[in-house]
Amino acid sequence: MKKILCFIFGIIAILFISAGCNSEKSMQELIREEKKAIERYIANNRLNILTSYPSDSVFGEKDFFKTNEGVYFRVTEKGTGEMATIYKTEVTLRVDSVHYFAHSDTSIYSMGSINPFEFIYGLTASYIANKDGMSFCPAWAIPLKYVGVHAKVDMIVPSEYGTATNNSSFTPVFYKGVEYTNFP
């Protein structure tokens, strides 16, 4: 009788453990959901994804350039044309608004603007939290290959290139009004 009870409890324990394991999503599933959320956002907003950067830096209202990293951005203000120099240029960055994608539907959860970040373009050791404790988004540096001081861009950022929090939660983000200022 004891053997039968142990066997039954053993099976019940295995079922509980396997049920618990199956309820959590794998990393591949989370990445797939994130990609689908970005694809839904692009489709719902009828965005035109460009595979090459416009030579004149002029974007249509619905145009977004997809970088090799998988980050999407569109230039809304071209700026002065003075370009950042990698490992030398100190940049101050401001963000007008942040919008978080939901994986399960087409919702986007918004928050207000982000206070300035100061960093040295290309020097990842300078990509740290601002004075408010918000962590840096590595994707913010990517458009600096294409735009200069006082340029303003909108960005769709997969979690891989987002803040530490976005990365760990597989949450893509839309940043509206990322402005690069104060190149010395």
Image (spheres, rainbow, N blue to C red):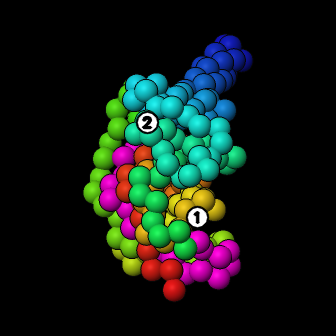
Is 19 rendered above or below residue 79?
above
Residue 7 makes an appearance in the image: yes
| Magenta span of residues | 83-101
Residue 88 in the image, given as x and y percentages of width and height: 65, 82
In front of the other: 165 or 92: 92
CA neighbours of label 1 inside 10 A, class few (<14), some (14 to 19), many (20+): some
Q: Quadrant of residue 85?
A: bottom right
* Residue found at x 28% / y 57%: 112
- 19 with respect to 112 (left or right): right
Label 1 sits on what residue type?
Leu
Q: Is residue 6 magenta?
A: no
The residue singled out by tag 2 in the image is 62
**Quadrant (top left/top right/bottom left/bottom right) for the N terminus:** top right
Residue 144's disc is 1
Disc on the earlier residue, 2 or 1: 2
* Residue found at x 60% / y 25%: 22
- 45 with respect to 73 (left or right): left
Q: Quadrant of residue 179?
A: bottom left
Is 116 rendered above or below residue 179?
below
